[in-house]
Image (cartoon, helix red, strand yellow):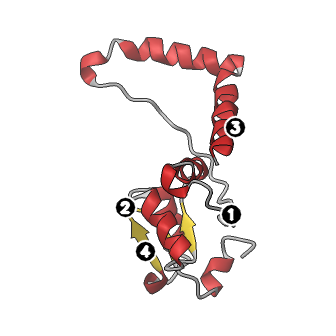
Amino acid sequence: PRRLEDLAAGKWRIEYRRGVAISEQTLKPLVAGERLSDVTSIEQGLKKLKAGRTDFYCDFDLAVRNGLAGPEFKGVTGYRQALDLNVGLPLYPYVHKSRAELAPRLAKTLKGMKTEGLIERYFQEAERELEAAR
């Protein structure tokens, strides 16, 4: 498929990781119930994909690449990204209420890191490390 909408017309078996609401909300309207299922872990989704028990596995790119960097997938090739859902997902840190005094300092530090480009730099470094691990 070239577009997300192409999944509706196909006969493919598609899985996503349980609890990843964006995957569920995006896929359920497009894929018939008997062709859509969920798994409990990234590793399970990747193993089923490798075994041919499913045709597509939907998850966050970084999560999948991290899963593929694990020891059970060392040297395994053949996985490739088929589609980019292109959903920019902001991530938010949370602190326990007993540590609420940390929240303003954490917010200030993260804002400064973003302004300095450190978050993007660290993200790129992590991507390089994941690629090197494969």
User: For the residue labelled by badge 2, is the local secondary structure a helix, a strand or a loop?
Assistant: loop
- Specify which label sits upstream in the sequence, 1 or 4: 4
Q: Is residue 12 above or below residue 121?
A: below
User: For the residue labelled by badge 1, is the local secondary structure a helix, a strand or a loop?
Assistant: loop
Amino acid residing under circle 1? Arg
Could you tell me which residue is drawn at 62 percent across and 43 percent down?
A: 133
Which residue is denoted by mark 1 in the rendering? Answer: 80
Q: Could you say which disc has been placed on residue 40 in the image?
A: 2
Quarter of the N terminus within the rendering? bottom right
Residue placed most toward the observer, 90 or 84: 84
Position of residue 108 in the picture relative to residue 118 (left or right):
left
Which residue is denoted by mark 4 in the rendering? Answer: 37
Could you tell me which residue is drawn at 50 percent across and 18 percent down?
A: 107
- Specify which label sits upstream in the sequence, 3 or 2: 2
Q: Is residue 37 above or below residue 124?
A: below
Mark 3 is surrounded, within 10 Å at the Cα level, by few (under 14), some (14 to 19) or many (20 or more) other residues, namely few
